[in-house]
Image (cartoon, rainbow, N blue to C red):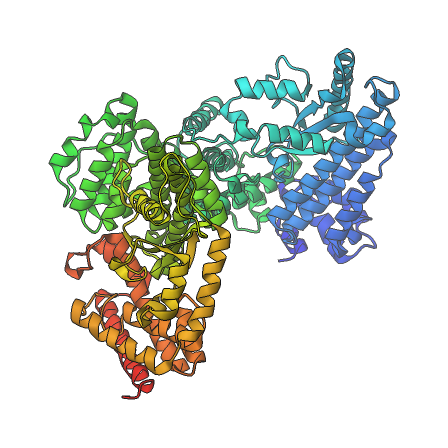
Amino acid sequence: MSFSDRMTRCPRSFDTAPGQEARDAVDGVSSDVAALVEGSAGCSPFLHSLSLKERDWLPEMFDNPEAAFDDLMNEVASIPVDETSSRLRRAKGRVALLVALADLAGVWTLEEVTCALTRFADLAVTQALRAALLPELRRGKIPGQDEDALEDAAGMVVLAMGKMGAHELNYSSDIDLICLFDEDRFDGDTYQEARTGFVRATRRMAAMLNDRTADGYVFRTDLRLRPDPNVTPVCMAMGAAETYYESLGRTWERAAYIKARAAAGDIKAGARFLDTLRPFVWRKHLDFAAIEDAHNMRLRIREHKGLHGPIRLDGHNMKLGRGGIREIEFFTQTRQLISGGRDPDLRVRGTVDGLARLADKDWVPGDAAQMLADHYRAHREIEHRLQMLRDAQTQVLPDHPDAWARLAALCDRDAPDFRDELTGRLQEVHDLIEGFFAPDSSSEKPVAFEGLDDEVIGRWRSYPALRSERANTIFDRLRPEILERLSRSSNPHEALLAFDGFLSGLPAGVQVFALFEANPQLIDLMVDIAGVSPALASYLSRHPGVFDAVIAGDFFAPWPDQVRLRRELAARLEREDDYERKLDAARRWLKEWHFRTGVHLLRGLIGADKAGAQYADLAQVILAELWGVVCAQFAQKHGPAPGRGAVVLGMGSLGAGKLNAGSDLDLIVIYDAEGAEGSDGRRPLATRPYYARLTQALITALTAPMSEGRLYEVDMRLRPSGNQGPVATSWNSFQSYQEQEAWVWEHLALTRACVVAGPDTLAADVEAFRCALLPQKGDRETVLREVGDMRARIKAAKGSGGAWETKLGDGRMQDIELIAQAGCLLAGQPERSVEAGLAAGVAAGWLNDAEETELAAAYGLCWQVTQAARLLGDKPLDEDKLGDGAKAFILRQTGQEHMADLRQDLERRTSEAAVVIEAALKRGTADG
C-alpha cells in the first residue's frame, strides 16, 4: 500500500480536518504530495505541519529519499558555526519528515530508519560541539590549543551511549552523552583551566541541542550517565572516569558501556578510553551477580513506574512495561556481560545483532533469540508510530478508541487485529524473559519421575554443593527441570547416577547452579551427556569446572590450528616447574579439548570426519610438546641427546590424521647419533641405550596412570622387526631395513607414516626418504598377492565380528585401508588418507571410478559408526543395550532414521565393498 493510501485511511475527524491552508498548499503540486499534505492531518498533526512547511522540498524527497537524505547531511556538515543552532533545528524537521515517510511507506527497514536518525544525531552533536568549543579556543581558554585543534576537539570526545551508541535511535529519542577530555594533553598548571573551558563548551553544546527556540529543538540531551553525576562536572578527565569505573563502577554502568561509542570530537582518544574500560565491562571470569543485578533493576523500574500487574494494552508502556523494549534489552545485555569477557564475538552494540550472536554461539536458544528479535523490531516500529503522532518522547499506548484507530492506521492495520497481535507479542516476551530472570520458584509437591531412584535423589541434600541456603534456593528451582530431563533420557537410571556423581563431586554449588539457571541450554547439554555417553558423563562428574569452559567463547569457536594449540599447551606446561606436574597439566589440557570435541560431536556441531581430524590434532600436539619436555627431563640426568636427536613417527590412524575418541597411538622412534658413541651428562649413556631409555620415558609419560589419568595407550609394534627389534631405531638402520628387509605390509604401513615430533632437519630427511622409497616398492603382483595373504591371516586370527563390527571383516575399515595403502604403493604416491589412497588406485589403473566410490562410501559409513561408538564407550555396540538417546545420536551421525535401516545399510555397503576388493585383488595377480 502506498503512503498516500495509508494516510487517506486515517479518519480526518480524529484531530484536525484539512482547512483552507492545506487546500491552498497543494495547489500546483503532484497528486502524491497533495495526498500527503491533506491526509496527514488526520493521522499525525505533527507530520501534517511538517509537510505543509516543507511542501516545496517534498517532490525531491519523493523522487529519491536516500539521495535527499545524503544531500541533507551534506548541508548540515557545511553549516557555518554562527548559524549552527537555528539551522540544526530546521534540518531536524526535515530529517523527521523524511525518515517518517520513508518508514511509513516501507521504503526503509527499521535498521535503516534508526541508522539514519543516529547518523543525523552524530553529525548534529559534532557540529554543536565545534560551535561550542570554537569560542573557547579563540579566547585561549583551552591552554596550548588554537583553532586548528578544532579538528579533534582539542582532545575532547563525546561518547554516544544507549540507543545512539548502538545506532538504534527512535523517532523522538533523547540522546545520552558522556563528555570526556584527554588530560594528557595538558600539564598540571593548565589542567584546571582546560577542564573549565571544556565544561563551558559542554554546557553550550547541550543547550544548542536541547533548548527550545522558535525553530524547535534538535535533541533532548541527557548528560547524567557520567560517573556520579551529582558531584562531577559535565565534562570529566578520562583518567578520573577510568578510576571511578575501576573502583566504583556498577553492573548497570557495565551494561551501558556495551553500546558506548565515540561519536564526536577526538574519536581516537575516545576509542583508546573505551579500550581501557574493556576489563571493566568484559570480565574475564563469569559474574553471576550481573544476572541478579539486572533482575533487581527490572523490579525497581516496575516499582518506581507502577508497572506491576498483568498486561493491559490501554496505557501500557512499550518501553518499560512488561514484555516491552527494555526487557529485551536487559536480557540481551546481561548475557553479553556474562559471556562477552570470554567470547569477543558477543561484544556488539545492537540489540538484534547481540541476540543473533548469542544464538550463533549457543549462549541463547536460537528460537528464543529469533522470537525476541522479531518482537523487538515490532515494538520499536510501534514506538516510532507513537512518537510520530505529536513528536513526543512517549512509549505509552493510547487509552481511547479514536487514538487506537489512528495508531493502527499508521501501522497499516485494523485496530482489533492490531490490539490482539500486540497483546500476544507482549505476553510472549514477558513469559520468556521472566522465565530466564526469575524461574518459577513456587513450591510444588514432589513429583515422582519414572526410572529415577528416590534413594539416590534423597541423598543430594547431604552433598557439599547443597550446604548453603543460597545454593539450595537456586537448586530448588532447577530440581524439577533436571529430574524431568533425566527421566526422559535414553537410560534414566544411568543418567541419574552420572548426575549424582557430578553433584557429589562439587565442592560448592552456587556458581554452577546459577550458571545452569542463567544458561538453561547447559541443562540440556548435561542431560545429553549423561543420557548418551557414560564416558563423557564420567569426566564431567570428576571435572565440573569444565562447565566454565563450555560457556566460554572458545568452547564454541572454530577449531584452532595446530600452531595455536601448541602455543596454548606450551604455555600451560611452562607454568609448571615440576616434571610430574607438567605431565598432569598435559593430561588436563588434553581431556578438556577431548571433552570439547566429544561435546561438539554429541550435539551435531561437527561430523565424524572433523572429529577424527580434531582428535588427531590433539595427539600430534601432545606428542610434539611432550617430546620436548621428556627430552629436557632426561637430559638433566644423562645429558643432551647425542647427534641430531630423535623424531617420533606417527603410524596408522595417527599418521593419517584421523583418530577416534578411544584411539591408541602407533609410534616409531628414529634417532640419528651422527657417529656419537654416547651422551655427555652426569650419568652418561651409550647411544643405543640412551635412545632406548629416552623412548621408554616417552611411553611412560604417555601411558602412566597419574592423578589426572593417562594420556594414551601406545603401540610400538610397527617398528622394524616388531617386538624383536630395539624400541628406538637408528636412522641408518631404518633406511637399510626399509630398503632391503622390510615386508610388504611394512611398506603398506609406511604409506601412512608422518613425523609428529622431533628436530625439523631429521624430520625432513625421514619424510624425503619415505617419499623416495615407496615408488620403488610398488610391484603389482607382489603387492596384491601379499595383501590377499594378509587379509586371510587377519580373518583367521581375529574373525569378522558381529553385525555392528566396523573395523574387522570383509569390506570393513581395515580391509579397505589395506586396499588404499596398496593403491598408494602401486601408484608410487606417498598419500596418507584412505580417500587419497583409493584415488591413487584409480590413477594406477587398478581400480575404476565406480569401485572407488563404493569403497569410499562403505568406509565412510563404517567410520561414522565407529566414531559414534567410541564416544559412547569402549565396548562394541550392542543395539539391545543402547538407550534412545544413544540410538538417536548414532542415527544422526549416519543420516539414518531407524537402527534396522542402518544395520541393513552397513551390511549392504560392506558386502558390496568386499566383492569389489575380491575382484580387484584377482585382477592384479597371476592366479587371478
Near-viewer residue (79 or 755): 755
- Quarter of the figure with residue 649: bottom left
Where is 697 relative to 260, above or below? below
Where is 769 relative to 178, above or below? below
Near-viewer residue (556 or 630): 630
Residue 43 shows in the view: no
- Quarter of the figure with residue 353: top right
Q: Determine whether, in the image, residue 924 is placed left or right of residue 264.
A: left
Q: Locate the N terminus by quadrant.
A: bottom right
Residue 656 position, x and y percent, is: 39, 61
Near-viewer residue (765 or 234): 765
Residue 718 position, x and y percent, is: 30, 61
Q: Locate the C terminus by quadrant.
A: bottom left
Where is 874 relative to 482, above or below? below
Residue 336 position, x and y percent, is: 49, 36
- Quarter of the figure with residue 351: top right
The residue located at (43%, 46%) in the rendering is 642
